[in-house]
Image: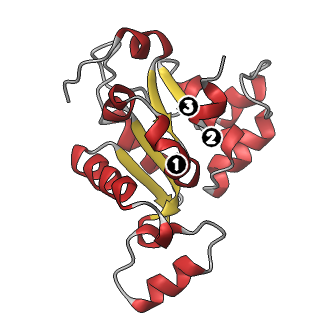
Amino acid sequence: MEESMTESSRKMGRAIFISASYLAKEFKNVPMEVLETSIFFFGSKRSWVFPSNSQEQQESVRQPTKYLEMDQEFKSLILEKEKQGLLYWLKPEQDFKKVSAFLEGITDPMTGENYKPLILDDDWWKKRLSFTYRTNRMQVIANYKMGDHDYAPVMELLIASNPTLHPVLSWTSDNTT
């Protein structure tokens, strides 16, 4: 997938938004060029945002995030990202090998090559001494083994595996001066 990137996007790397609930609140503050080139990796189920029956709707209502009340413009953005092949829903499968395969199918605009596989090697993580986010080796390992989507371990896994990705939980927090 060929995409152009702005100078600021090139400096920070391609944004990968990891929370539907945070992004739903902030997407109107994110520059359009960032949204257009970004990847979405959400820990939720697609059916929580787009239920296809009453059972899925009831399950969505039971979630702490009010997915059904998300802005229609945001939902349209999600559908566009799906069409582009730039969105991955972790649930229900919760399989980081599949997340890795998804990322490996996307071209990194900074290198012109596809993203590298996620580092899902326990021994590699056990030897890691420094971390970018507030997490540790055992949290990262447990997170990908359990198929969880705890924010700091997910962000650490993404950036350690592909340093040209810029994991974003909160655009406002990441981009204030």
Which residue is found at the position 27% from the left and 15% from the top? Answer: 112
Which circle marks residue 172 in the picture?
A: none
Which amino acid, by three-letter code, is at mark 2? Val
Marks 3 and 2 sit apart, C-alpha to C-alpha, by 9 Å
Which circle marks residue 167 in the picture?
A: 3
In the rendered image, is residue 164 in sight?
A: yes
Which circle marks residue 154 in the picture?
A: 2
Which amino acid, by three-letter code, is at mark 3? Pro
Question: To which quarter of the image does residue 129 belong?
Answer: top right
Q: Are marks 3 and 2 in contact (CB under 8 Å)?
A: yes
- In this rendering, the answer to whether 1 lies above or below 79 is above
Q: Position of residue 72 (x, y in %)?
A: 36, 61
| Residue position marked by numbered label 1 in the rendering | 96
Which residue is found at the position 80% from the left and 33% from the top? Answer: 136
Of circles 3 and 2, the one toward us is 3
Of helix, strand and loop, which one carries label 2? helix
Q: Position of residue 52 (x, y in %)?
A: 34, 81
Q: Position of residue 164 (x, y in %)?
A: 47, 18
Of helix, strand and loop, which one carries label 3? strand
- Horizontal side of 151 relative to 134 (left or right) equals left
- In this rendering, the answer to whether 141 lies above or below 136 is below
- In this rendering, the answer to whether 46 lies above or below 34 is below
* Neighbours of disc 1 within 10 Å: few (<14), some (14-19), many (20+): many
